[in-house]
Amino acid sequence: MQDAPTVEGAGAPRGRAGGFTDWLPGAARRRRAAGDAMIRTFEGWGYGMVATPLVEPLDTISSGVGAAKQTQLFRFMDADGALLALVGERTVSVARVVATQLRDGPYPLRLCYAGPVLRNQPPLGGRRRENLQAGCELIGAGCIAADAECVALAAEALSRAGLGGVQVDVGHADFLPGLLEGAGLDASDRERVLAALSGRDLVAVEEALSETSIGDAERALLLRFPALRGGREIVDAAAQGLRAERPRRALGELAQLWDLLMAYGLEGHLHLDLGAVRDWDYYTGPTFELFSGELGFPLGTGGRYDGLLGRFGLPLPATGFVLHVDRCCDALARRGGEAAEPLPPALRVAYAAGGEAIAIRAATALRGPGAAVACDLEPSDGPPAGADLYVDADGAARWWDGSRWADASTAEAVAALAGSTNGRRAT
């Protein structure tokens, strides 16, 4: 995956655009295998595959994503003058499909997808502008069991793609806003405190709180917010002294989610992180991120977004997640693992002058059982190095049995190669 070399001459390639990646044959196959493993896992849990366009009307995307993400859109105008954009994520597209074509259910709807997304962001620190994503949306279910299913499914999909043992960090998007509202802060104070918490700047948090009338219990909790991370005991610790219903309800949902995820077998991989700061304008309930030790970026993110479908005229609860396939490939490379078993090298069929038609038929026969076969494009005088089968114009053949050339008819050689498990390759 390297830039094309600079070549002298008019019209010569000068390299690729920043933030985009060339996936060469081995890496491209591993990338595809990782995505395929995820999709097979999704379908094994009852999720139906949908495919949506890479291009959406700008107003469709804008209605579903926040202002910050709108600034990252690749925008353009089509021949009819309509404003369009390349999708930077696919949940909005799935929401559009459900609201316009699957309104009648049956609910809950379980949908999955895979495809590229593009974001117009500076390619700093190796950040990609184009990424392959795979994800699921569970629409029409407002219960914690739906959130637990998505968390467990995301972890299993990563495991099936070769990334077992990931860490899952779970938070709740409504806990902090509910805490601030319950403490009596007005909208401007809440916005100031949330901004300080987003930067994890405790000095700024303390300064913001000093200008409010927040109670002692809430103040103490907010000042140790980044440290509110651990096991189920975090729920009980955070609930001490809280009287407002909204944050207590969020903590109760996290406790219920924890218990369900233990049933899914995530013990030892699950952490509660009440200090996780996510998009409060988008997420409405439990949120989660999945990490491996090989990368500092999450391999996947998800959560509950009960407000999105309503923007398309279909107010339904929903939860889901997205897995970043390219990051998963990065993690696999650093881990030294593979997304799939490598293919054996392609068989090579060579031929003497006048034997091209026989070679083509032999290669076709070998491909029938599923072997990868490459046929030479020009004749050669005798079996060339690297060949597995060499045919003459009269149908006589020689095939490499792993240690020597064996004489046979073409049909016999094809049958022998098709059934051979020996190491091959003439030298």
Image: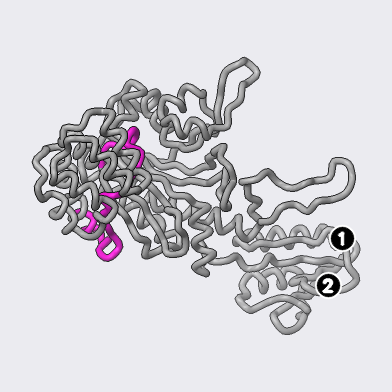
* Image quadrant in which the C terminus is located: bottom right
Q: Secondary structure at mark 2?
A: loop
In the image, residue 126 sits, relative to residue 96, either above or below, namely below
Q: Which mark is residue 384?
A: 2
Q: Nearer the viewer, residue 230 or 179?
A: 179
Q: Which residue is mark 1?
A: 378
Please give the range of residues in magenta: 260-285
Q: Residue at 19% of width from left, 45% of height from top?
A: 219
Q: Secondary structure at mark 1?
A: loop
Left or right of 58 in this view: 375: right
Judged from this view, the residue extending furthest toward the bottom is 403
In the image, residue 172 sits, relative to residue 341, either above or below, namely above
Q: Residue at 63% of width from left, 50% of height from top?
A: 21
Judged from this view, the residue extending furthest toward the top is 80
> Residue 336: x and y, percent?
52, 69
> Residue 281: x and y, percent?
33, 33
* Image quadrant in which the N terminus is located: bottom right
Residue 262 is covered by the magenta coloring:
yes
User: Which numbered disc flags the more N-terminal residue, 2 or 1?
Assistant: 1
Q: Residue at 59% of width from left, 46% of height from top?
A: 123
Going by the numbered disc 2, the residue's amino acid type is Pro
